[in-house]
């Protein structure tokens, strides 16, 4: 049976997490509704229990020790999840309501959001989903969003991230006609001599440099070509029309490869990277509407995975 925390252990951890968040005993004591001396004693008791110092304390500053930082990184997400679970149970009798602002990459919207919209809106008529579909990487907190769907490599470190799908892989592709006219690249660096269909992250001034792996090390190739798009679907259509070599998520070109419209290129140098995630700011209490959307997205993702394995 899992060993549960004793009440004093929980109180000490709660005290530690709050001080670590504010890096101030006075502000943490105010937040918890206890005196600074009582809070300091709880932290000292925890330090005695674990046998290491968790904070550096001076008359002016409070900072985490290396051991304190490691403990904080481990226990804070668990505490947030526990708080969310309690809040969910507390509000289980309430119908979720209100607006949830979502920022999502286009590929994530098509794959994970579109399939759940009918069932979600039928089940939660009091919830309004305000969805921005855009491939730009923004600060979702500064822009006022509650949740984002994006690939793992562009998620801020202070966000809660929940995996939605498997790892992804990008591959270079071209039509048989293009390859007959211009030849096959034998190595990713040969792409500099080819007409490539480029893509630019929205909001960024230069096109994306294509990324590959060799001997376990990632490297990028700055390609050139007659077209630059901010939309990946348009870039793929241009590749299908034989204008040049495209670079796309493998899942989006599988059917075209199967029919012979596109030929995969340089696959030994194409490696997987973290796929799509739900990400949202850390928070003590999660609104029922936001929790309902996260649960719906996770359930939809699980259904897709089961269907693919069937």
Image (tube, grey):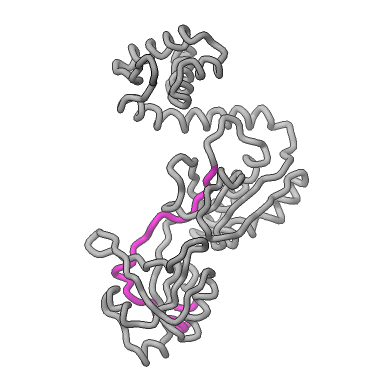
Residue 230 vs residue 102, the one in the foreground = 230
Residue 265 among those drawn in magenta? yes
Q: Residue furthest right?
A: 125
Residue 253 position within the rendered picture, expressed as x and y whole percent measured from the top left: 47, 73
- Residue 109, compared with residue 53, is above or below; it is below
Residue 120 position within the rendered picture, expressed as x and y whole percent measured from the top left: 70, 50
Residue 248 position within the rendered picture, expressed as x and y whole percent measured from the top left: 44, 70
Residue 50 vs residue 33, the one in the foreground = 33
- The region drawn magenta spans 256-280
Asked where in the image residue 224 lies, by quadrant, the reply is: bottom left
Asked where in the image residue 217 lies, by quadrant, the reply is: bottom left
Is 68 placed left or right of 18 in the picture? left
Residue 42 among those drawn in magenta? no
Q: At 49% from the left edge and 70% from the top edge, which residue is drawn?
A: 252
Asked where in the image residue 294 lies, by quadrant, the reply is: top right
Q: At 43% from the left edge and 76% from the top edge, which residue is drawn?
A: 246
- Residue 99, compared with residue 183, is above or below; it is above
Q: Residue furthest front?
A: 60
Residue 218 vs residue 202, the one in the foreground = 202
- Residue 175, compared with residue 304, is above or below; it is below
């Amino acid at each position: 049976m899992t060993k549960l925390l004793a009440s004093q252990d929980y109180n000490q951890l709660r005290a530690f997490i709050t001080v670590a968040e504010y890096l101030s005993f006075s502000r943490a004591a105010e937040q918890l509704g206890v005196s600074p001396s009582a809070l300091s004693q709880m932290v000292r008791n925890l330090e005695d229990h674990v046998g290491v110092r968790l904070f550096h304390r001076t008359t002016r500053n409070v900072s985490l020790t290396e051991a304190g930082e490691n403990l904080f990184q481990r226990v804070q997400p668990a505490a947030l999840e526990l708080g969310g679970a309690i809040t969910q149970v507390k509000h289980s009798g309430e119908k979720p309501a209100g607006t949830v602002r979502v920022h999502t990459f286009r590929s994530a919207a098509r794959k994970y959001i579109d399939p759940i919209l009918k069932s979600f809106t039928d089940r939660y008529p009091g919830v309004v989903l305000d969805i921005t579909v855009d491939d730009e990487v923004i600060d979702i907190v500064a822009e006022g969003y509650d949740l984002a769907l994006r690939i793992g490599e562009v998620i801020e470190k202070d966000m809660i991230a929940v995996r939605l799908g498997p790892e992804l892989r990008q591959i270079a592709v071209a039509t048989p006609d293009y390859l007959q006219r211009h030849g096959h690249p034998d190595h990713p660096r040969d792409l500099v001599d080819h007409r490539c269909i480029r893509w630019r992250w929205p909001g960024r001034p230069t096109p994306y440099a294509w990324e590959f792996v060799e001997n376990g090390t990632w490297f990028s190739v700055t390609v050139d070509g007659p077209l630059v798009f901010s939309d990946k679907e348009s870039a793929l259509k241009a590749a299908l029309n034989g204008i040049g070599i495209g670079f796309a998520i493998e899942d989006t070109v599988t059917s075209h490869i199967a029919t012979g419209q596109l030929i995969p290129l340089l696959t030994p140098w194409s490696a997987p990277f973290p796929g799509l995630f739900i990400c949202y700011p850390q928070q003590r209490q999660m609104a029922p509407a936001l929790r309902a959307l996260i649960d719906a997205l996770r359930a939809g993702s699980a259904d897709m995975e089961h269907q693919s394995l069937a």
